[in-house]
Amino acid sequence: MAKKNPAPVQLHAGDLARARVTSAHDVPVRRGRYVLYWLRALRRAEDNLALDHAVHRANELGLPLIVYESLDVRYPYASDRLHTFVLESAVDRRAAIEARGAAYAFFLPRSAEEARSSEALAKLAASAALVVTDWHAPSGPLGAFFSRSASALGARVGVRVESVDDTVGVPMALFAAKHEVGARTIRPKVQKVLEASLVASDEPVVKAARLRELEWAFDPVEPTMDSISSLVASCAIDHTVPPVSSARGTRAEALARLDRFIATRLRAYDEARNDMGERGSSELSAHLHFGVLSGRSVARAARASRAPTEARDSFVEELVVRRALAFNHVMTTPCEGALSHHRYAGAVPEWAQRTLGEHAKDERSTHTFKDWESASTSDPLWNAAQTELLRDGVIQPYARMLWGKVALTLAPSAETAFEWLVVLNDKWALDGRDPNTYTNIALCFGLHDHPYPGRAVFGTVRCMTSKSARTKWDTRAYEARVRAK
Ligand SMILES: Cc1cc2nc3c(=O)[nH]c(=O)nc-3n(C[C@H](O)[C@H](O)[C@H](O)COP(=O)(O)OP(=O)(O)OC[C@H]3O[C@@H](n4cnc5c(N)ncnc54)[C@H](O)[C@@H]3O)c2cc1C
């Protein structure tokens, strides 16, 4: 008799909640004065499953909770643009966290020396019974450091560290075992757990009295919209990359953007997202990247809306499926060395490297990095996309794909094009340094795709040109919009 296929394993909310939590340093909880939540990737107090976990653990242990957040000057590309956005996200955070019954402080070291010598986190962890942190994807040049830092802290101080993933919406531990071929292979797996993953936070409150006598080992800052520019000016970071005027990092702005998107743009999203003549997408990527907004809440809001099913599904596809695919790629590709996900040799599939190599000598308009960065190449549409990046820190979704593809025709080699794209995106994009960054740049070079009929320069990598975009979309409206801002 033929064997029946086993019934698919159904994961329930409890299983999914457990899948989000890993022990970054697996030792028993010890005696301590408090539970410490080290807030890193999820820069919000609301609908934050890592903060919720910290509150629940504090309540189980009958201890107070303290929350530590910082912004280091030492990460690559630290600039006025990124510091401003993060500090804006922290306006009012102390009040929101104190309302949950925890103490909170933000450490803003002004120099590398201050960051190194303060030992702020280690000092706080030394008196903790348990450290909870939010899981940080192993993304980009600092990926290995971030993914090791939680376990390194635990080992150094001898404290248990629990790490909670609330980045993509679905628990990424379920999608870490193997490198997915593309959206079609990860989509059914994501869909299986999507509904149960989109739980809303129950916003638990700490029961133990808040610690009032606490030595923070640094002078906490409390950013206000008025004080941020002087705080940023006092930091040893790149002051030549200015803040953007078109986006604030605040939670209020993130919620306003979400409301506007759900009310006006979502209903036509599946058509309008790509239309370069329109602003049809959510413009939420920077807030999602810094965790100011929860992917779960955004997905819930979209699914609950009255927009047509095709539009809702198409949005959730980008927000959860494509994002999970991007995270899967960085989680299953090394983050260090020549074969890492942020280097050409590691990110671009072999078939694509081969065909691009075979076309290495094809004629192209070679430019310098300076031409690229200053948006002065021979391709006006590419320059418009680069101008948008320089000024707004993001690029319209279709223009961004065009920017990544056409780059192949504007650099001395495919490898150089890849490296320059990574540098420009990491340096200028508010949503840069994200798993989406490296995966999508690699996608322009053939990742998660298959060969197409051969073309000059691209070989069998799917080709896109400014000429073809001009026949498809109102690119003049896009260029005018970029010029007008
Ligand atoms: C060359 C290139 C570089 C890119 N670099 C980044 C980057 O640095 N950071 C970044 O967040 N996205 C990046 N993307 C993906 C995508 O272009 C942006 O997420 C999108 O343009 C952001 O605009 P939006 O928030 O209005 O998107 P919407 O269309 O409204 O989508 C909602 C959210 O879904 C996610 N999303 C959308 N498209 C994708 C995608 N293709 N892959 C994974 N997630 C997606 C984003 O979080 C986005 O905010 C890049 C794409 C390309 C082609």
Image (cartoon, helix red, strand yellow):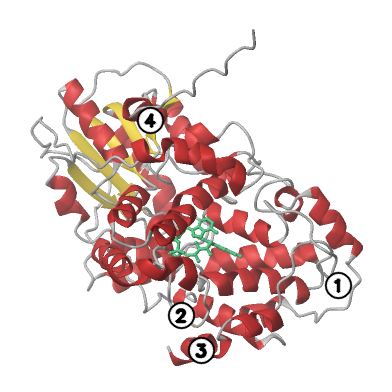
Q: Which residue is mark 2?
A: 278
Q: Residue at x 43, y 55 (%)?
A: 313
Q: Which residue is mark 4?
A: 16
* Foreground: disc 1 or disc 2: 2
Type of residue at label 3?
Ala
Tag 2 secondary structure = loop
Whether label 4 lies within 8 Å of ligand 1 gets the answer no
Q: Which residue is mark 3?
A: 477
Per the model, the C-alpha gap separating discs 1 and 4 is 47 Å
Per the model, the C-alpha gap separating discs 1 and 3 is 29 Å
- Say whether residue 214 is visible: yes
Assess disc 4: are there few (<14), some (14-19) or many (≥20) residues with their C-alpha within 10 Å of its C-alpha.
Answer: some
Q: Position of residue 124 (x, y in %)?
A: 29, 36
Please report whichever mark, 1 or 2, sits nearer to the chain's N-terminal start.
2
Assess disc 3: are there few (<14), some (14-19) or many (≥20) residues with their C-alpha within 10 Å of its C-alpha.
Answer: few
Q: Residue at x 42, y 54 (%)?
A: 72
Please report whichever mark, 1 or 4, sits nearer to the chain's N-terminal start.
4
Q: As drawn, is 12 to the left or to the right of 54?
A: right
Per the model, the C-alpha gap separating discs 2 and 3 is 8 Å
Q: Which residue is mark 1?
A: 456
Type of residue at label 4?
Leu
Question: Considering only vertical position in the picture, is 281 above or below 102?
Answer: below
Q: Position of residue 135 (x, y in %)?
A: 42, 39
Tag 1 secondary structure = loop
Type of residue at label 1?
Ala
Q: Position of residue 167 (x, y in %)?
A: 41, 45
Please report whichever mark, 1 or 3, sits nearer to the chain's N-terminal start.
1
Please report whichever mark, 2 or 3, sits nearer to the chain's N-terminal start.
2
Q: Nearer the viewer, residue 413 or 74?
A: 413
Per the model, the C-alpha gap separating discs 4 and 2 is 38 Å
Please report whichever mark, 4 or 2, sits nearer to the chain's N-terminal start.
4
